[in-house]
Amino acid sequence: MDKDDALALVERLAVEVPKIARVYTNGAWTEAVYQSLTDFKQEKGWKIFSSVKCYLGEYHCDFMLFEDGYGCRLACESQWQTFRSNANELKWAFDKLRGVKSDVKLFVFEGPDTWKDDIREYLEDYAQLDPVETFVFMRWNYKQWECSWWKPSVAGVQTEAFNPIAFLGQRIP
């Protein structure tokens, strides 16, 4: 899965997730992300873990899409309603994406305006980053997605500052 495929998937999720969720609860939004990824994996002929349904048997991240004979194509962490919980919850959820091998690491979340600062500390000084991986961020801000992506510029500790590139700001009717 390359960056362009990942960005197209994000555009799809931006439309599908709010429609599927219908109500604004943590469980409904996580289930909607799972359903959207399940539909996508069927089109690709991949597998999703956990394979039963979300919340049953999480494999490191909330959801992972695998291709037989290749490995993990997409790892997804989904974190909602962080404004009601400990601020470190967002960092903890994102941190799981650092520890998994995957072409694309998708972070779908609701978080504060300071999310880039919160994530920066987890990426800039991390020695196990690789330019082959792409991080994609989908931040829900009440009625709008703010989406961006970032790739490490070098293997290991980064020589450039974390500066994700915005590519989609979409309001949901």
Image (spheres, rainbow, N blue to C red):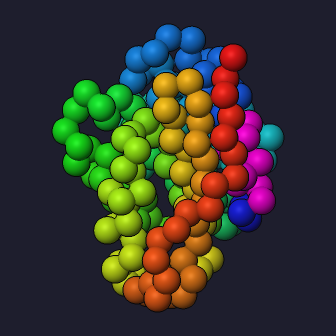
Residue 122 vertical placement versus 142 (above, below): below
Residue located 25% across and 27% down the image: 84
Secondary structure mainly formed by the magenta segment: helix
Residue 67 falls in image quadrant: bottom right
Q: Identify which residue is drawn at 59% across, 30% down.
A: 144
Q: In the picture, residue 89 is in which quadrant?
A: top left
Q: Is residue 63 visible?
A: no
Name which residue lies at 46% across and 77% down: 161
Furthest-top residue in view? 23
Query: Is 167 colored magenta in this rendering?
Result: no
Residue 152 percent across, percent down from the top left: 54, 77
Q: Tell me: 22 left or right of 90.
A: right
Q: Is residue 45 left or right of residue 25?
A: right
Q: Residue pushed farthest left?
A: 86
Q: Which residues are magenta?
A: 4-12
Rendering quarter of residue 56: top left
- The extreme front residue here reads 113
Q: Nearer the viewer, residue 61 or 168?
A: 168
Q: Is residue 67 above or below residue 173?
A: below
Name the foreground residue: 84 vs 48: 84
Q: Nearer the viewer, residue 6 or 47?
A: 6
On screen, residue 150 versus residue 16, left or right, reads left
Q: Position of residue 35 (x, y in %)?
A: 61, 28
